[in-house]
Image: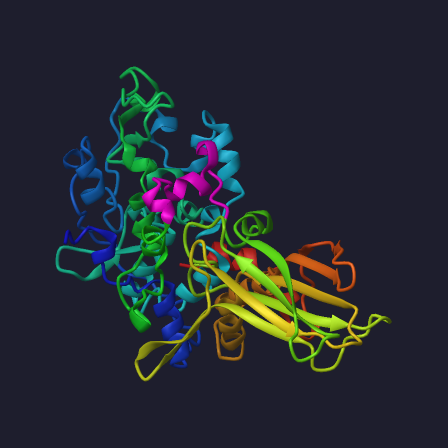
Amino acid sequence: MNLLDPRARPFPVGPFVCLLLMAAGCSDGDAGDDATTAAVSVNRVSPPDERVFSELSDFVNRYWLRPVPAQGQAPEHFDSLAASLHPETCGRCHPAQYEDWQTTVHARAYSPGLSGQLVNWAASDPGTVQSCQVCHTPLSEQIAQLPGADGEFATNPDFDPALRNQGLVCAACHLRGNRRYGPPRRDGSLQPSAPQAVHEGVTARTTYFEDSRFCATCHQFAAPAPNGKSLQNTHEEWEQSRYAAEGVPCQGCHMPDRRHLWRGIHDPDMVASGVTIEWVETARPDDPAGAVVELRLTNTGTGHHFPTYVTPEVIVELWLEDESGATIADSETTSTIGRRVKYEAGQWVEVADTRIPADSSYSVTTSTTGSAVRAHARVRVHPDAFYRGTFEGMLNRSLSDTSRALIAEAHEEARSSPFVIFEEVLDLGSGRVLEKEVGPAAADEADAVVGVAAALDVGAVARASQP
């Protein structure tokens, strides 16, 4: 297998090795806040003029080097606009794409939760930092330290901290060696732009930009794979679904009409559109006055498991009510849909996996009695369940001021991210359904961390001041 195929790659250290270190009780004290490294020449993977892509195989095998090699010196005839790597510059001529990108998780890929972890190892473990950044901020110009020819990490003279803070930028996907690459024209042709166009236009167009393998570089790991499944297994889940067989790539759902939206688990409308939820009521053989009430969730619109990855959880609640609206004792059922993992004894272990594969169903049931007149159900999505617990653990440890401010901000975001995609009351007599309002789920105030508000006040300063 080609070693540049995403399925053949070992799991990058990434955010989960950051979490691994936290699980081991890592504490940074004040390390790394004021540390500096002498600036020396950093070896680039390959000169810009050697990175030319024209055939699909070129893109699949060589486009996503990690990190993306530095662009090198821009051509002399490029003005500052054409030479810039900053997304706001791209937005001057591509306002629709830029406005979409600003609303995305990609634009916040260098998030408080990530940067609050990485600041702990900026000086002592730059390898861990880079292994996270190759997906979150993949350009060499976004990484403060890179390995030289001798393998030792040194200060990167091309590093741009402002560019790093912008996360997954336009240039990360579209720019290699100061050449622009993109998808076929809307008519399907691969004709590049005219040479006299701004920044020489699009150097090459390729179907790779419409191929799920483009996304798999960061959305599929090979190892670790507890219980035979990678921690990040989205591309393989898609390959096993009918969507792959029907030629519907990731971009078909996450970039509709080529819009740069990438909506996912944090978007209530996107999540709700991926699953069909319905009531099923059947007779109860042992009680003529009762019935078995089932809430069935079917993954009808997601080209991978629902949900994919190990960080979200979907909580399904089902209970019965009497005529007064009171909950009937022992009728409450709560189920969690998700994949839970933990790190113990030096390895990742799968605790449970109740996710729903594409076109499969998951049911929650409860049995009614003669006093039950209504069934009530709610489906609540916790996009950042894993991270919330992780950040709570970090805040109970010794952290530098910079790290604490960023992690507190990340914890507050994770704590406030849940939302409800379904809430209905079923009248057991008539079968009539009363639809309830759905939307953001109220956070439990008892879970709030003392001092979060004060920490948020310095969060922006912390991001700007970190190495």
Look at the picture and state if 147 lies above or below 57: below
Task: Judge whether residue 405 can be spotted in this image.
Answer: no
Which one is nearer the viewer's eye here, 180 or 328? 328
Q: Is 246 within the magenta? A: yes
Task: Judge whether residue 422 can be spotted in this image.
Answer: yes
Q: Is 56 within the magenta? A: no
Residue 458 lies, in percent from the top left, at: 58, 61
Q: Residue at x 13, y 55 (%)?
A: 149
Q: Is residue 280 left or right of residue 433?
A: left
The stretch in magenta equals 242-263
Q: Is residue 15 left or right of residue 412?
A: left
Q: Is residue 431 left or right of residue 96?
A: right
Which one is nearer the viewer's eye here, 432 or 300? 432
Task: Identify the image quadrant of the C terminus.
Answer: bottom left
Q: Residue at x 60, y 56 (%)?
A: 277
Q: Which quarter of the picture shows residue 72? A: top left
Look at the picture and state if 97 lies above or below 333: above
